[in-house]
Image (cartoon, rainbow, N blue to C red):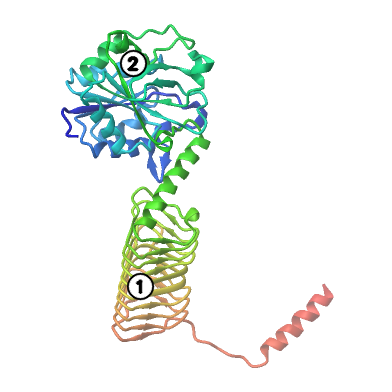
Amino acid sequence: MTRQRDFAAVILAAGKGTRMKSDVHKVLHPIAGRAMLDHLLGVLDTLSPARKVVVVGAGREQVAGLVEARGGDIVVQEQQLGTAHAVRMAEPALGGFAGDVLILYGDTPLIEAETMAHMLDRLHAPDAPALVVVGFRPADPMQYGRILAAPDGTIEKMVEYKDATPEERAVNLCNSGMMAARAEDLFPLLARVGNDNAAGEYYLPDVVMLAAGDGRKSAVIEAEPWEMAGVNSRAELALVEAEWQRRRRLRAMADGVTLVAPDTVWFAHDTQIGRDTVIEPNVVFGPGVKLGEGVRIRAFSHVEGAIVAAGAEIGPYARLRPGAEIGERARVGNFVEVKKAKLGPGAKANHLTYLGDAEIGANANIGAGTITCNYDGFFKYRTVIGEGAFIGSNSALVAPVTIGAGALVAAGSVVTKDVAADAIAIARGEQVEKPGRARRFRDFMTERKKKS
């Protein structure tokens, strides 16, 4: 359906989050490296809302930066008197907004744009319901509020679990709390909500029955239970993370990526992967990763803030840190760490190496145990290695330094000066051999030990 009116979103995030046992605001705890609230705002932005209002209790200063960066407004619910009261706090911030209103929850980050759009579309279906509520059927309904609905989705009754009869509790269609309404209907209904209930709170679902008393029907749409998963504890945070990861793995494989052991691969919210890439077991992606086609990430590697071009191979046990750029067919092997460094096409660092603040030319070979000494305790410096250069094992390149194209650095060298193209650099102490001295040393020490 074509959207008929602008819409605003009111996101409730005023809960104290005491079960998280954290100094961090609950909605800022991350899923896939991204705050729950930011997940929700990001999905919401794909639908181009006219306004966004986040209702918080304590911790306004923690969420303000994120909300403002997303173009939203914050209001404070000083006293937690229930969900209806929380939504009412947003009315002044909307300033007479004439459109539709979506009510969402900052600790329920997996809802998809299609579900949000469905809420708004259902609101403007021919039967014109007063409100649209999102329902779901969890495996264990627990203490969710219940929705009693006719076969056509018309809501006959909504009741909180505490106030439900045994027969009503037997119904498995549960209330997510998410709702859509026209602003001109929502706020007058909210003003009429009372708190004569078991908890003494102002319940948002009561607006449905108030509308029914006015002769107006409301409707329920159903969403998948995983979309409605909320977070109130660290355990629930882990469950939501696991569900997000499960779905992301399925999408990766559907897009032509091979995951050898899917359950052991962890993605970030923005991981990009080209087709025909193979990801081996126990690989972790941090934010900011982009992999080209035909890449292989071998087992037990950690990749964050890195770009890996087509055909490159990483790992096993490799670490790519922010600013790493790995060229086509390049090779970063086991126990190699790359930070803010660029490896050209075909370049190789096969094992036991640290490359930081560096530029390595195409087809250069970095021997085992090589390090770029990029930090003097105060400032960072850059190392440049030319195309086709060969750096021998156990070399230390003390930046700033440039190794020319085709140059060769002998194993065990400490290079402190630039090396010209096609030159050989040897920077190590001269080997001295003293015949028989080892035997005499052992004999001397043996006798000394006997006397001690």
56 relative to 137 in the view: left or right: left
Q: Position of residue 39 (x, y in %)?
A: 34, 39
Nearer to the camera, 301 or 219:
219
Q: Is residue 176 visible in this depiction of the protein?
A: yes
- In the displayed structure, 398 sits above or below 377; it is below
Label 1 – label 2 distance at C-alpha: 61 Å
Identify which residue is drawn at 34% across, 73% down.
329
Q: Which one is closest to the eye, mark 1 or mark 2?
A: 2
Residue that protrudes farthest toward the right in the picture: 451
How many other residues sit within 10 Å of disc 1, few (<14), some (14-19) or many (≥20)?
A: many
How many other residues sit within 10 Å of disc 2, few (<14), some (14-19) or many (≥20)?
A: many
Q: Circle 1 is placed at which residue position?
A: 330
Query: Where, by quadrant of the figure, is residue 447 drawn?
Result: bottom right
Which label sits on residue 208? 2
Element class at badge 2: helix
Quadrant position of the N terminus in the picture: top left
Residue that protrudes farthest toward the front in the picture: 151
Nearer to the camera, 199 or 358:
199
Quadrant position of the C terminus in the picture: bottom right
- In the displayed structure, 355 sits above or below 410; it is above
Q: Position of residue 371 (x, y in %)?
A: 43, 70
155 relative to 170 in the view: left or right: left
Identify which residue is drawn at 48% across, 13% down.
163
Q: Amino acid at mark 1?
A: Ala
Which label sits on residue 115? none
Query: Where, by quadrant of the figure, is residue 148 drawn?
Result: top left
Label 1 or label 2, whichever comes before in sequence order = 2
